[in-house]
Image: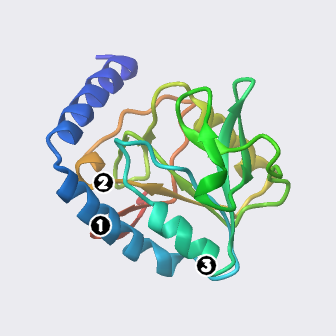
């Protein structure tokens, strides 16, 4: 089986798992995940995060806490097929973007500095830090570019328990993360 077929099968499997996860279970996992993640983000950090979709861990409480601590938070926007991060100031200033993802408004300042930490969404992760996204490669291209231009950024995958699997099939263009956080804690990637 080719990696693309394996990924397709895994995406379907994860979707099935997420369908069976109750709202109560997802909310409890999300709260715990945010609690586990916060100590790994030093106060005063510049954090690239994301606004969660319904099928993702709800990290909105974490975003609120980061803003409360006066960390600088940026969220992704897809503009002309490219991933761009714009400043997030509050939930009232986000709108539905091209891919149906909530994102900062176009007039929000664009990221120009090196982020300290990037919270990366995904469909599946494994303990080696391998990540499978939604299939368009936007995050992989952006992560590769950031690693080349700004070494030292810490990339942390954000995963519900049912999204952490034994093996994520990888292609040459796929970019791993440095760690994965779940409701049980932070898992450093084993290379």
Image quadrant where residue 99 sits: top right
- Label located before the other in sequence (1 or 2): 2
Q: Do the residues bearing badges 1 and 2 touch, measured as CB atoms within 8 Å?
A: yes
Q: Is residue 23 left or right of residue 116?
A: left
Which of the two residues, 140 or 167, is positioned nearer the viewer here? 140
Residue beneath the point at 27% across and 70% down: 184
Q: Is residue 19 left or right of residue 42?
A: left
Check disc 1 and report its element: helix, strand or loop.
Answer: loop
Label 2, residues with CA under 10 Å away: few <14, some 14-19, many ≥20: many
CA gap between label 1 and label 2 equals 7 Å
Q: Please name the residue that numbered disc 1 is placed on.
A: 183
In the image, residue 66 above or below residue 5: below
Q: Please name the residue that numbered disc 3 is placed on.
A: 68
Residue beneath the point at 74% across and 59% down: 151
Q: Is residue 156 left or right of residue 132?
A: right
Percent across and percent down for residue 125 are 37, 47
Specify the quadrant that holds the N terminus.
top left
Residue beneath the point at 51% across and 47% down: 176
Name the disc covering residue 160, or none: 2
Q: Do the residues bearing badges 2 and 3 touch, measured as CB atoms within 8 Å?
A: no
Numbered marks: total? 3
């Amino acid at each position: 089986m080719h990696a693309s077929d394996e990924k397709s099968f895994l995406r379907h499997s994860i979707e099935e798992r997420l369908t069976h996860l109750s709202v109560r279970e997802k909310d409890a996992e999300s709260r715990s995940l945010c609690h586990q993640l916060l100590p790994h983000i030093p106060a005063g950090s510049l954090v690239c995060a994301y606004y969660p979709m319904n099928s993702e861990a709800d990290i909105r409480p974490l975003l609120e806490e980061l803003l409360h601590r006066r960390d600088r938070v940026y969220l992704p926007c897809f503009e002309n097929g490219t991933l761009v991060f714009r400043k997030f100031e509050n939930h009232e200033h986000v709108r539905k973007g091209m891919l149906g993802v909530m994102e900062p408004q176009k007039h929000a300042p664009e990221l120009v500095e090196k982020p300290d930490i990037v919270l990366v969404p995904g469909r599946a992760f494994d303990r080696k830090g391998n990540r499978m996204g939604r299939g368009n490669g936007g995050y992989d291209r952006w992560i590769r570019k950031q690693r080349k231009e700004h070494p030292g950024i810490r990339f942390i995958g954000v995963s519900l328990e049912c999204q952490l699997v034994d093996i994520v099939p990888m292609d040459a263009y796929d970019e791993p993360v440095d760690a994965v956080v779940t409701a049980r804690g932070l898992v450093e990637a084993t290379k």
